[in-house]
Amino acid sequence: MPSWVIELLQPHNLVPMALVLFVLWLMIRGAFKAFPFVAKFVDLVHTLVGDESNPGIGSRMDAQTKQLAQIMHEVLPNHGSSLNDSVRRTEQALEDHLKIADKQDQEQKETAKRLEEHIVETKEYGPWIEDVHDHDIEEGKKEQKSERT
């Protein structure tokens, strides 16, 4: 056996050696237990700082601020060119068309009512009108025969 091993195994060196091995074991065990926390911390720092392919949180927040400004421009009224203004114009036009449609529906109902009344009033003249019509057809046929001969 090498002399240094024999020297370490002496009784006066065993207690300090056991203490050193115990501390070394605690450090290794602590490193393994702390690894998930350290990995999460490294991921957090990477997210905050970013790199070339994935920008940091500050850059992303700046980009989102610009996008939010564009969205706000479209959503809030701005005298004609926003989505909000367009929706308001569309709603107003729809209300106008609905008023016109209601007016036309009312006129159609009134016309249908007058037509029903007219039909009821003239129902008794139906047979007389048919007789006149038949008579006119007969007269027309007689005239056509007389013109041919």
Image (cartoon, grey):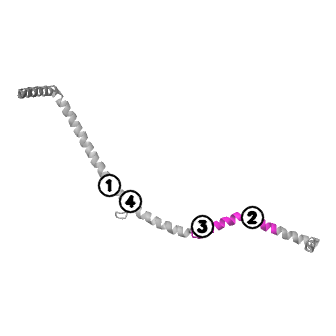
Does residue 106 appear to the left or right of 121 in the view shown?
right
Q: Are marks 3 and 2 in contact (CB under 8 Å)?
A: no
**Quadrant location of the C terminus in the rendered image:** top left
Does residue 67 appear to the left or right of 42 in the view shown?
left
**Snapshot quadrant of residue 2:** bottom right
Residue 36 position, x and y percent, is 69, 63
Q: Which residue is mark 2?
A: 32
Magenta-drawn segment: 24-53
The one of 144 and 47 positioned closer to us in this rendering: 144
Report how far apart the C-alphas of labels 1 and 2 lie in the structure: 68 Å
Work out whether mark 2 precedes mark 4 in sequence or the reverse, and give the earlier one.
2
Indicate which disc residue 84 carries: 4
> In the rendered structure, which amino acid carries the disc numbered 3?
Thr
Report how far apart the C-alphas of labels 4 and 3 lie in the structure: 36 Å
SS label for mark 4:
helix
SS label for mark 1:
helix
Indicate which disc residue 92 carries: 1
> In the rendered structure, which amino acid carries the disc numbered 4?
Asn
Does residue 4 appear to the left or right of 60 in the view shown?
right
Viewer-side label of 3, 1: 3
